[in-house]
Image (cartoon, rainbow, N blue to C red):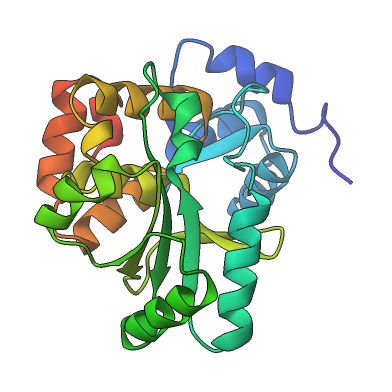
Amino acid sequence: METHSLLRLDDLKEYFKDKTVFTINDLRQYYQRIDTSFNESAFKWKIHAIQKKEFLRTVKRGVYTFQSGSRLLYQPGISSRLKKKYKEIKKEFPYTGCCIWETLWLNELMNHQPGHFMDLLEVENEAAQSVFYFLQQQDEKDKIYFKPSDKEIEQYIASNRQSTIIRTLLTQAPTQEQEGIRIPKLEKILVDLFIDRSLFIAYQGQELITIFKNAYRQFPVNISTLFRYAQRRKKKDQLTDFILKNEIIPGELID
């Protein structure tokens, strides 16, 4: 069985100490250099074993960086309010795909805290309106908006301390399950903040740059996932320009 020493992890880190990122070919050349009996099958197994040890993280397909202990996976705390809301919906609509999150999660990435917060519930298109009516019946005090217009956002949502927004969940949107709750991946949240500027008006300008930079510094943002979702929303070029202009992600990581 491969051990830490057999995988040459200490030597590997020393060899790439001057590189922020490196490719699968860089890793192949490293093992070819130190292993006279190198073969491709064994190399692929080594890469799998190294990733299983969480020594490397994937930046995008075929591109890696060293995993830092401080860059933990993005796992925000899910409030009891969100859990309750999500479970009520899944009980009533068990076959409907949805995900839920709240803008309070962004506080750790920001310099200034906004005066209002939103619960974002994204539901498959055919059921979104039915879920909206269902939630209205559950709690009449809850300020719920279905695909709000810019006017509604400006007149009502921006002045509410807390609102619930029902939106359509795009197919193939990057989500993850945590504590039995389907939530968006960090990459999805970042792209949505960038694109849906009216809804997320409190998170624009310099604050948006700060959120992106802190997200990239603190968590293992998957670049491929980020841009694939931006492409799905037809804003990949605009997001690329924003990221390069503000030096958020090294240019060599962007296709």
Which residue does the image show at 16% across and 56% down from the upper left?
Answer: 152
Image coordinates for residue 239, horizontal then vertical, percent: 17, 41
Above or below, 137 relative to 53? below
Above or below, 234 relative to 72? below
Image coordinates for residue 177, horizontal then vertical, percent: 62, 61
Image coordinates for residue 101, horizontal then vertical, percent: 49, 53
In the displayed structure image, the side of residue 107 where residue 195 appears, left or right: left
Above or below, 227 relative to 20? below
Which residue does the image show at 27% across and 41% down from the upper left?
Answer: 159
Q: Quadrant of residue 173?
A: bottom left
Q: In which quadrant of the rendered image does the C terminus lie?
A: top left
Image coordinates for residue 8, horizontal then vertical, percent: 73, 26
The count of marks equals 0
Q: Can the viewer see residue 229?
A: yes
Q: Residue furthest right?
A: 1
Near-viewer residue (13 or 96): 96
Near-viewer residue (135 or 112): 135
Which residue does the image show at 59% across and 27% down from the upper left?
Answer: 71
In the displayed structure image, the side of residue 143 where residue 14 appears, left or right: right
Q: Can the viewer see residue 124?
A: no
In the displayed structure image, the side of residue 170 where residue 38 appears, left or right: right
Q: Quadrant of residue 136?
A: bottom left
In the displayed structure image, the side of residue 156 where residue 94 appears, left or right: right
Q: Quadrant of residue 88?
A: bottom right
